Image: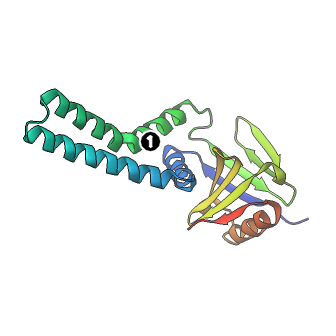
Amino acid sequence: MEKPITVSFRWTKEEMLRASRRATKQTPGVRRLYLVMRVVALGMLVTGTYSFSTGHTNLSGFISMIGLSMFFMAIPLLQRLAVLKTYRQMPVRDRLVTWEITADRLTAKTELATSEMTWPALIKVIRLSDGFLLSLHPRSFHWLPSDAFGDPADIERFAELAKSKVQRYEQAR
């Protein structure tokens, strides 16, 4: 039996934000949606400013357009605030998380709990430049940062294991 792959890191606020950013970028359509929201916000800002300056709208209409465009521009910030709120409610926040990975199973441990799954529980693994996203469901994931692997060679061992065990293995663009 081969030595298990060990991944150990502290689940800090910064790590949670990094994982959330990576997962958001890998969610289909999110980049496009963020671009559309920015274009709509800019269009509303330009339209509102033009309408107000030419007298086609009053001050309250102008303020409404500004408010709506600011809302669309603020959605990424609102998402960040939601992630931070979730982090504050997590019992494992700022605790050490240790994963032990073998050819049969993946086990995550903290001082509070242990969670174990077999490879078929994963629907997808995405390799990113700085870690791996392990998906159990299209909207949920586990995060394994590359800098948390005990041995740098284990990063490639994990990638090869994931390729052979999970139906969908992707290399992020």
Q: Where is residue 50 in the image (x, y as percent from the top left)?
A: 14, 44
Residue 89 appears at what percent x and percent y?
55, 30
| Residue furthest to the left | 54
Crowd tier of the residue under label 1, counting other residues whose Cα lies within 10 Å: few below 14, some 14–19, many 20 or above: some
Q: Farthest residue to the right: give it.
A: 1
The single residue placed furthest to the front in the displayed view is 56
Q: Is 73 placed left or right of 109 in the picture?
A: left
Q: Residue at x 45, y 49 (%)?
A: 33
Instruction: Residue 91: name its quadrant.
Output: top right
Quarter containing the C terminus? bottom right
Rendering coords of residue 18 (x, y %): 51, 52
Name the amino acid type tagged 1. Arg
Image coordinates for residue 2, horizontal then vertical, percent = 87, 66
Quarter holding the N terminus? bottom right
Examine the rendered structure and indicate whether residue 55 appears above or below residue 157.
Answer: above
Q: Quadrant of residue 144?
A: bottom right
Residue drawn at x 77%, y 41% as measured from the top left: 115
Along the line of sight, which residue is nearer the eye, 96 or 74? 74
| Image-quadrant location for residue 45 | top left
Kindly identify the residue that appears in the image at 81 percent across and 46 percent down: 117
Q: Name the residue under label 1.
A: 80
Residue in the image at 42% along x and 50% along y: 34
**As displayed, is residue 151 above or below residue 17?**
below
Horizontal side of 116 relative to 64 (left or right) equals right
Please tell me whether residue 143 is drawn above or below residue 129 in the rendered image. Answer: above
Q: Which of 103 and 97 is in front in this view?
A: 103
Q: Is mark 1 on a helix, strand or loop?
A: helix
